Amino acid sequence: MLQTLPIWLLVTPLFCETIPPALTLDQKAQFLLNAKVIRTKGAKKGITGTVRATLSDGTTTHDASIQRIDEEKARFETPMGTEINFRDTYKFNIAGYRLGRMLGLGDMIPPSVERSYEGTKAAWTWWVEDVQMDEGERVKKKVFGPDKDKWSRQYLIMRVFDQLIYNTDRNMQNAMYDKDWNLWMIDHSRAFRTRTDLQNVKILDRCDRQLLAAMKRLTMETLKAELTGYVRDTEMKGILARRDKLVAFFEKAGESKLYDFLPKQ
């Protein structure tokens, strides 16, 4: 569901950068962990005090978003109502990327790692390059890109993923499109709730076959191996409970509601 306020990663990098064309996700992660900070500035948009940093390892120069928020409240008032056991944490950005890779979504969620910034642990996230517009701008312009089917299939993947992680803050500024109309999902700091229900079944329509198969393979053991330290056990149980409901929904819907977009794992 698109709602609330933007957070970060909203525009094409302002600083000069050099990106080797064959840079893998793992190489990007290592860059984020080890590259030297050249300069920093505050992000133009957002409510969590995110810092934008230019990093360099001597070969590659690229920007990163540094987000340090780590808040927890027993009750929190949101535009959608009162939320119990509210968490807004940088850890969920890292968890979102890690879970995304488990599901074959590495090309839709930018790498995010944990690294200290000014003495505080934070999520350092790869700044999405060549961004042409966010979802808000797309809706305003009423465009879908040259391949409407590609747009639709990516958008449906985002909807399923957001239901899986119970993302309460997928607003129009943290879904964006690069110059090739690839959809990028950013900012998951208000996801991974403990709730076992689906947030909004009505938005579900179709599901990618590979995504459905990957969700079926999730277990508590595989989640712990990837998400421990970023997501609590109760939150992992929430993922699995919602996974069960998503699988049941699409299996009941039948073959006509499945499609192929993601590469086979």
Image (tube, rainbow, N blue to C red):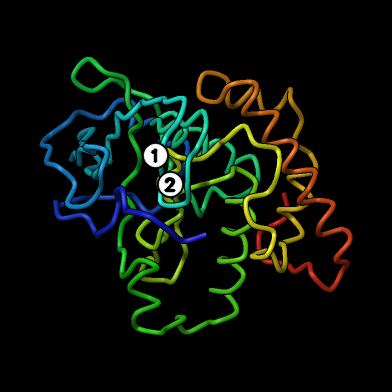
Left or right relative to 142: residue 45: left
Q: Position of residue 95 (x, y in %)?
A: 52, 33
Residue furthest top in the image: 119
Q: Position of residue 127 (x, y in %)?
A: 31, 48
> For numbered disc 2, what is the local secondary structure?
loop
Q: Earlier in the sequence, mark 1 or mark 2?
A: 1
Within-10-Å neighbours for mark 1: few <14, some 14–19, many 20+:
some
Residue where numbered disc 1 is placed:
28
Residue at figure coordinates x 31%, y 64% from the top left: 131
Residue at figure coordinates x 58%, y 26% from the top left: 227
Q: Can you say whether 68 is above or below 203 in the image?
A: above
Total tally of numbered discs in the picture: 2
Residue at figure coordinates x 71%, y 53% from the top left: 211
Tag 1: amino acid? Lys
Nearest the eye: 218 or 167: 167
> For numbered disc 1, what is the local secondary structure?
helix
Whole-angstrom CA distance, mark 1 to mark 2, is 9 Å
Residue 11 in which image quadrant: bottom left
Q: Position of residue 250 (x, y in %)?
A: 81, 59
Q: Can you say whether 83 is above or below 137 in the image?
A: above
- Which of labels 1 and 2 is toward the front? 2
Residue where numbered disc 2 is placed:
110
Tag 2: amino acid? Pro
Q: Position of residue 145 (x, y in %)?
A: 45, 81
Residue at figure coordinates x 89%, y 61% from the top left: 252
Q: Can you say whether 243 is above or below 222 in the image?
A: below
Residue 114 in which image quadrant: top left
The answer to whether the residue labelled 1 contacts the one labelled 2, judged by CB atoms less than 8 Å apart, is yes
